[in-house]
Amino acid sequence: MSRSGDALAHTVGNPFRPAVMVLVTLGNPREKFWGAILSLTPEGLSLCGVELASFDDLVSLVKDGEPFSPGVVFLPLHRVERMELDLPDGSIPSLSQRFTSKTGLDPATVLMRHIAVTPQTVREGK
């Protein structure tokens, strides 16, 4: 897989950290997710995103300014078959790049702002 210098520099160290965009393939049942990492622990992966099949629908909603609710999910690590950074492959743009080119917005920022309002922040009046 060919990667640009910027994308390759992004992978130095631990690339799987909060707010990084990833593609996740799960087994039993087989599912694929695209989203921003919330946390990664020995128990599992917390992710804010959508099933890969819903990616184009999400882009359309965001582009049209429609309300949407990305999924905030915990995926037990034993179900995770593969997790990869959402990076371009040669001349093929990453899903994050496609999202940005169609909406003008950064996908991690869009997804992460949906989890900024938690029941605790509502109770505290923030």
Image (tube, rainbow, N blue to C red):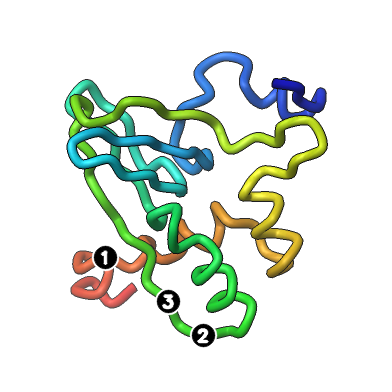
- Classify mark 2: helix, strand or loop: loop
Q: Is residue 77 left or right of residue 106?
A: left
Q: Is residue 126 above or below residue 27?
A: below
Q: Residues within 10 Å of mark 3 (few under 14, many from 20)?
A: few
Q: Are marks 3 and 2 in contact (CB under 8 Å)?
A: yes
* Earlier sequence position, callout 1 versus callout 3: 3
Q: Is residue 100 left or right of residue 81?
A: right
**Cα distance, mark 3 to mark 2?**
6 Å
Q: Which residue is mark 2?
A: 66
Q: Quarter-wise, where is residue 90 in the image?
A: top right
Image coords of residue 52 (percent x, y):
45, 53
Q: Which residue sits at x=72%, y=29%?
A: 7
- Classify mark 1: helix, strand or loop: loop
Image coords of residue 36 (percent x, y):
46, 46
68 and 18: which one is in front?
Answer: 68
Q: Residues within 10 Å of mark 1 (few under 14, many from 20)?
A: few
**In which quadrant of the rendered image does the N terminus lie?**
top right
* Earlier sequence position, callout 1 versus callout 2: 2
Circle on res. 118: 1
Residue closest to the far top: 13
Q: Which residue is mark 3?
A: 68
